Amino acid sequence: MSNSANRKPDERVGQQIKIPKNYDNERETIGTVFDYERSDYAITQQGQRNIMSDNMNDNMNNGKRRSLITYNHITYFLYVISYFTAGLLWIVPIIMNYAKRHDADGSWLATHFDWQIKTFWYGIVWFVVGIIIITFALGGFGVSMFADSGNIAIGSLLLAGLGLFIIAFTFIWHLYRMIRGWIALTDGRPVP
């Protein structure tokens, strides 16, 4: 008995599944070995899923989970409303996300907090990049007006168009991520 307690779990699995050693046909041997490896892998994966689901259930009770789900609904709503306030409300949900982020550790709700935080910061970075490009381009446009050069003016307008494209893309990307995350939250599943 003490010998079986010292064995690793995969050694016990190997003993439970018997692989005949003497086969005349190589195909049967390969198939049997493959079935053994697949079953070992399946057993390992099943054990990991059980551990993860047990940890998630242990880390958070039902009332706390409902509270965090409601909290996330509010932050998603504030992000969407921020489009109608020229982005002035962007700061409120990001502070809310940082304030409650650690309450959801170990659960599927943590992915929603991380999703919103990453979306905020990437959105800010790309928006600032677009603004810098537009500012640089319009500065060149002003120089071209004084220099009376049409080529510089066309290049500046194209560069400003690139900056506007980046800002528009960031706006649509941010809205897409908020909607995708909110739908996943409503369905009760994590976001990738």
Image (spheres, helix red, strand yellow):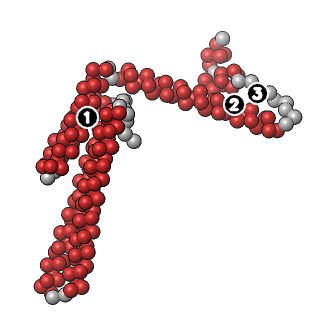
Above or below — where is 116 with respect to 124? above
Amino acid type, callout 2 = Tyr
Judge from the rendering whether residue 190 lies leftward or rightward of residue 28; answer left or right. Answer: left
Give the quadrant of residue 36: top right
Q: Which residue is mark 1?
A: 72
Q: How many marks?
A: 3
Q: For this view, does 7 lie left or right of residue 155?
A: right
Callout 1, which amino acid? Asn
Which residue is more in the foreground, 83 or 41?
A: 83
Q: Are marks 2 and 3 in contact (CB under 8 Å)?
A: yes
Q: Position of residue 102 (x, y in %)?
A: 28, 32
Residue occupying image coordinates x 85% and y 36%: 25
Which residue is the site of mark 2?
36
The extreme right residue here reads 24
Alpha carbon separation for disc pair 1 and 3? 52 Å
Residue 115, percent from left and from top? 32, 42
User: Residue at point 54% right, 27% down?
Assistant: 46
Question: What residue would you read off at disc 3?
Answer: 19
Q: Nearer the viewer, mark 1 or mark 2?
A: 1
Q: Between disc 2 and disc 3, whose residue precedes?
A: 3
**Amino acid bearing label 3:** Ile
Q: Secondary structure at mark 3?
A: loop
Disc with the residue nearer the chain's start (1 vs 3)? 3
Does residue 115 appear in the picture of this structure? no
Query: In the figure, 72 relative to 180: above or below?
Result: above
